[in-house]
Image (spheres, rainbow, N blue to C red):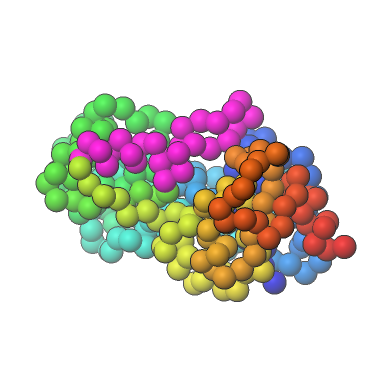
Amino acid sequence: MTWLLDCDGVVWLAEQAIAGAREAVTTLRASGHRVVLLTNNSFPRRSDHLAKLERMGMPTDPADVLSSAMAAALLLEAGERALVLGGPGVIEELTARGVTTVTPGTGREVGPVDAVVVGMDPSFDFSSLAAAAAALRAGARLIGTNNDPAFPTPAGMLPGAGALLAAVARAGEAAPTIAGKPYPPTVALVRERVGEVEIVVGDRPSTDGLLARRLETRFGLVLTGVTPAGHGQLDPEPDLEASDLLALAQAELH
């Protein structure tokens, strides 16, 4: 059976592994469970995620790493052209799909595009916003890799892709289609690449919890990311809750 794990706030915080995560993943695998990691962070390439897991002592098969960038690529077709406000992970997945990508600020004319794809982009600025808004007003559709407003780091919460997407949607007066958790493209991605899931483990009920419900499986909440200890009522309510991934795994396996 498969455990589907969120990454930020469950396995790591930015470049820092969360205590016990390596032991939890090792224990689950030793118990015969498949561990698949699914992140809404579209910025890194799959190879970046794999290298990070290797550094943290959790080497992982490439087939067991999924991201919102992969889900976003499902919303475009080969031969289409996309303006990307995002990282190399988005560009990699779109290119593999056969989509031509352009980015603002490269000195090239953007020209007509079929879609504007917005993900996490630390270089986001006014010129990027203006280029995206112009493309949307010219008829391009708007795709967001995810709409998380913020993400956890060791230094606290930082603005997420959802914050950038909101600015682009407002400036271009366009309604976005969201690819990441808990939306249909990610549900389809998980069903295609993973199949049946025993439990979704995450730190955010609105994404991880709702994804679990849409996959018709259990939601395990950990308190190492967005949701603090001492929280009030949640929607959806978790089926299981623990201080961290290791505690959740131990509670399930013993």
User: Which residue is at a point 57% across and 56% down the rendered structure image?
Assistant: 236
Tell me where residue 59 appears, x and y as whole percent.
Answer: 69, 53
Q: Nearer the viewer, residue 157 or 93?
A: 157
Image-quadrant location for residue 201: bottom right
The residue depicted at 23 percent of the width and 61 percent of the height is 79
Residue interval drawn in magenta: 147-172
Drawn side of residue 97 relative to residue 113, left or right: right
Q: Quadrant of residue 237?
A: bottom right
For the residue pair 83 and 54, the one nearer the viewer reads as 83
Indicate whether 203 appears above or below 65: above
Relative to 150, residue 96 above or below: below
- Assign the C terminus to one quadrant of the image: bottom right
In the rendered image, residue 172, in percent from the top left (x then y), is placed at 20, 40
Residue 249 visible: yes
Along the line of sight, which residue is nearer the eye, 152 or 82?
A: 152
Q: Residue at x 31, y 27 (%)?
A: 125
- Within the magenta stretch, is there residue 153? yes
Q: Position of residue 72 (x, y in %)?
A: 38, 56
Residue positioned 42% across, 64% down in the render: 184
Image check: 18 left or right of 170?
right
The answer to whether 2 appears left or right of 206 in the picture is: right
**Where in the figure is residue 17, as x and y percent of width and height?**
70, 39
